[in-house]
């Protein structure tokens, strides 16, 4: 933090569970180069044309969660490694609501140039504080409102989920695939649909059974839903959860699974076929370069495999060869930009009740994709009303 011209805030530092080396960001010389994590030692010089920056990352969970927060932390580390001269901190387990407002305001007062809010739960707090500090830039993950100093960012995670569906559909022997989902939000519904469409492309008899936890990270709820899905015959488990518990239960029960957020193979090496992952470092690096070059303007970013914002890990050696070949083929098309989320939802496409939602010859544009709040045919389960 900028200790020479702003006071260091003990309350904020207390929230950083992992030791971070902090050095002064001098008013005249900017942020001095130093590792922001003990495991990184970036070069000690900055480009003479680059603007030194102090950056704070706001996390809702822990960097060791194996999921959402860990993926953002990996992005921060990639940023620190790629661009010398940055000073970054991260704050774990930050509550939403009024406390988030207080934390964000304190960061802005301490002189941070860029504040990265990595969860939608902070969106209202960011909107409130950003108005008070127009000189501070904010990045809001999953947000839907940009202003002069707030950019929003997210990824087309449905693309790697489609690839996951291809692999799961090629793997299942019971034709029942389980999906442990957090909340019935539009993006999660869209992910389940994309996953199902991939599974049924690989295996027309495949169905995807959805179980809801109504929580982002509750190991007991995830264990319960995963167990229920396995008990009814699902032999592959996918998830939109922030912990690797569904992967671990799948391994315990001798079936296969699809990881999410970060590579979950280390948690269940005998079960994980592959993982749907975020690659936030690409976005963070690009954004900081723009700020340093004075070309940054607030915008809404939504990147897919072509932009390397999202990815699908290399399938395991025990994944079926037919599935791996199909994944390689479609992934190459996604990376080239010839097949993506728009094409995944190309018509004719009907919902669970058989109603045509996308007519033949039509693809969904950005606004229409945001409004996919219905399940495609092949999904077993309903969407909770609240």
Image: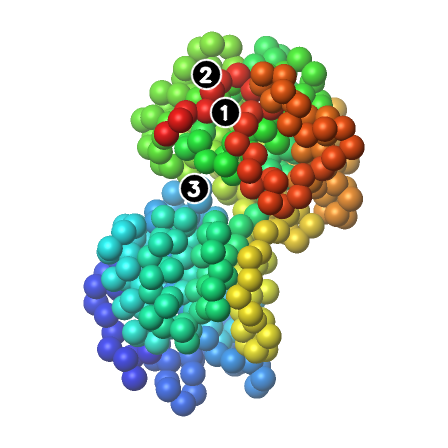
Q: Is residue 368 above or below residue 222?
A: below
- Secondary structure found at label 1: strand
Horizontal placement of 51 versus 103: left or right?
right
User: Do callouts 3 and 1 mark residues in contact (Cβ within 8 Å)?
Assistant: no
Q: Is residue 18 above or below residue 234?
A: below
Number of other residues with Cα within 10 Å of mark 2, as a class: few under 14, some 14 to 19, many 20 or more: many
The residue indicated by pointer 1 is 179
Q: Which mark is residue 201?
A: none
Quadrant holding the C terminus = top left
Residue 83 visible within the image: no
The residue indicated by pointer 2 is 229
Horizontal placement of 121 versus 141: left or right?
left
Rendering quarter of residue 350? top right
- Secondary structure found at label 3: loop
Most distant residue in the bottom direction: 28
Q: CA distance from mark 3 to mark 1?
A: 18 Å
Q: Earlier in the sequence, mark 3 or mark 1?
A: 3
Q: Residue at x 76, y 48 (%)?
A: 336
Q: Earlier in the sequence, mark 2 or mark 3?
A: 3
Rendering quarter of residue 287? bottom right
The residue indicated by pointer 3 is 66
User: Do callouts 2 and 3 mark residues in contact (Cβ within 8 Å)?
Assistant: no
Residue 362, how many percent across, how many down?
74, 35
Q: CA distance from mark 2 to mark 1?
A: 8 Å
Q: Residue at x 46, y 68 (%)?
A: 149
Q: Is residue 28 above or below residue 363?
A: below
Q: Residue at x 46, y 75 (%)?
A: 53
Q: Earlier in the sequence, mark 2 or mark 1?
A: 1
- Secondary structure found at label 2: helix
Q: CA distance from mark 2 to mark 3?
A: 22 Å
Most distant residue in the left direction: 10
Residue 138, how many percent across, how many down?
44, 64
């Amino acid at each position: 933090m900028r200790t020479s011209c702003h006071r260091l805030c003990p309350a904020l530092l207390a929230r950083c569970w992992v030791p971070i080396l902090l050095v002064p960001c001098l008013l005249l010389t900017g942020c001095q180069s130093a590792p922001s994590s003990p495991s990184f030692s970036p070069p000690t010089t900055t480009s003479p044309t680059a603007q030194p920056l102090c950056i704070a990352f706001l996390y809702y969970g822990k960097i060791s969660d194996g999921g959402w927060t860990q993926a953002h932390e990996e992005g921060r580390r990639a940023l620190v490694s790629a661009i010398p001269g940055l000073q970054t901190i991260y704050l774990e387990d930050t509550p939403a609501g009024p406390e988030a407002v207080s934390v964000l305001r304190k960061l802005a007062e301490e002189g941070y140039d860029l504040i990265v809010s990595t969860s939608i739960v902070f969106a209202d707090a960011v909107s409130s504080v950003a108005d008070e500090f127009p000189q501070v830039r904010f990045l809001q993950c999953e947000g839907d409102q940009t202003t002069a100093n707030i950019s929003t960012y997210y990824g087309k995670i449905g693309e790697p989920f489609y690839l996951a569906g291809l692999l799961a559909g090629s793997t299942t022997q019971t034709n029942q695939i389980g999906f442990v989902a957090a909340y019935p939000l539009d993006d999660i519904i869209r992910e389940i649909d994309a996953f199902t469409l991939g599974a049924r492309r690989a295996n027309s008899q495949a169905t995807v059974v959805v179980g809801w936890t109504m929580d982002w990270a509750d190991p007991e709820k995830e264990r319960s839903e995963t167990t229920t899905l396995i008990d009814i015959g699902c032999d592959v488990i996918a998830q939109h959860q922030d912990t690797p518990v569904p992967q671990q239960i799948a391994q315990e029960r001798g079936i296969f699974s699809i990881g999410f957020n970060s590579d979950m193979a280390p948690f269940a090496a005998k079960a994980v076929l592959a993982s749907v992952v975020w690659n936030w470092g690409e976005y963070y690096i690009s954004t900081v370069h723009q700020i340093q070059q004075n070309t940054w303007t607030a915008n809404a970013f939504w990147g897919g495999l072509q932009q390397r914002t999202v990815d699908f890990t290399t399938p395991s050696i025990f994944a079926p060869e037919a599935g791996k070949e199909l994944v390689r083929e479609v992934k190459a098309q996604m990376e080239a930009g010839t097949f993506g989320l728009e094409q995944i939802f190309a018509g004719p496409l009907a919902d669970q009740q058989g109603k045509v939602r996308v007519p033949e010859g039509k693809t969904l544009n950005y606004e229409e994709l945001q409004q996919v709040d219905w399940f495609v045919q092949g999904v077993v389960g309903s969407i909770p009303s609240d």
